[in-house]
Amino acid sequence: MLKGERVGLRPLETEDAILLFKWFNDQRVLEDLGAEHIYFCVSLEEEKAFVEKMLLDRHSRFFIVTRLEGGKPLGLIGLANMDPRNAGCELRLVLGEVEEWGKGYGEEAVRILLRHAFDSLNMHRVWLRVADYNERALRLYRRCGFRDDGALRDDHFHKGGWCSARIMSLLESEWRSA
Ligand SMILES: CC(C)(COP(=O)(O)OP(=O)(O)OC[C@H]1O[C@@H](n2cnc3c(N)ncnc32)[C@H](O)[C@@H]1OP(=O)(O)O)[C@@H](O)C(=O)NCCC(=O)NCCS
């Protein structure tokens, strides 16, 4: 378990499909995600297959964010598209327990994972993709030091229209000097 002050990150397991099934069927959780690979109304079987795929992908490492006190699972965080040659990876984050938003857990989870990426995995660049209208996530990522790389115009369909997203990134040197 990777530990912070209030939350920890433990490796994703097969049995967690039931948690993801709940989180990825909650409209409030999906609303601002803007992820091209998310389909609404996933079945438990699909979710199990999704988790197996994540577990078998050796270029990804996913974790369940848990509250240290009491062990409540809060969401999913991970590094995907890990590229050993160029020392880059994509950060992904979903807190599925909506009533736990706005308590600083998301920020703490990102900071724990960044420490792991830069200090243990020897990453040079951590990047992420975020929808332009996802204000809460944008503020969180900026607080953690991420900067805008570029725009993804009309990236995805959202609430009846085309919406843009952006790529943000954080370099190891920037993280160390912050
Ligand atoms: C986006 C998301 C990860 C944010 O997680 P979160 O835990 O609510 O984020 P935080 O609590 O760290 O930050 C949110 C607010 O809580 C505030 N906060 C409250 N208590 C806090 C504490 N003890 N410590 C730090 N911040 C605290 C922060 O200041 C922040 O305020 P702001 O948004 O006005 O700047 C979460 O809402 C989520 O998973 N949403 C759905 C999926 C999604 O959009 N994922 C991102 C895809 S790119």
Image (spheres, rainbow, N blue to C red):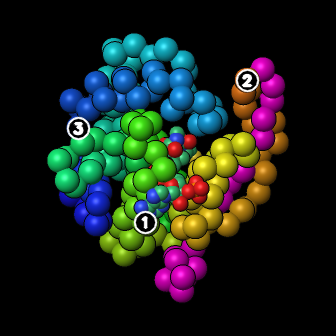
Q: Nearer the viewer, mark 3 or mark 2?
A: 2
Q: Tell me the quarter of the picture where residue 116 sits.
A: bottom left
Q: CA distance from mark 3 to mark 2?
A: 33 Å
**Label 1 lies in ligand 1 vicinity (Cβ under 8 Å):** no
Query: Could you say where residue 151 lies in the image, as x and y percent from the top left?
Result: 78, 51
Q: Quadrant of the N terminus?
A: bottom left
Q: Nearer the viewer, residue 164 or 143?
A: 143
Q: Is residue 22 above or below residue 101?
A: above
- Residue numbers of the magenta segment: 160-178
Residue 164: say if magenta: yes
Q: Which residue is mark 1?
A: 111
Query: Could you say where residue 159 lies in the image, as x and y percent from the top left?
Result: 73, 23
Q: Residue at x 41, y 38 (%)?
A: 99
Q: Which residue is mark 3?
A: 13
Tell me the number on the disc at residue 159. 2
Q: Nearer the viewer, mark 1 or mark 3?
A: 1
Secondary structure found at label 3: loop
Q: CA distance from mark 2 to mark 1?
A: 31 Å
* Apparent side of residue 176 relative to residue 168 in the rendered image (left or right): left
Q: Is residue 73 above or below residue 173?
A: above
Query: Could you say where residue 164 lies in the image, as x and y percent from the top left?
Result: 78, 41
Q: Are marks 3 and 2 in contact (CB under 8 Å)?
A: no
Secondary structure found at label 2: loop
Badge 1 crowding class, 10 Å Cα cut-off, few under 14, some 14 to 19, many 20 or more, is: some
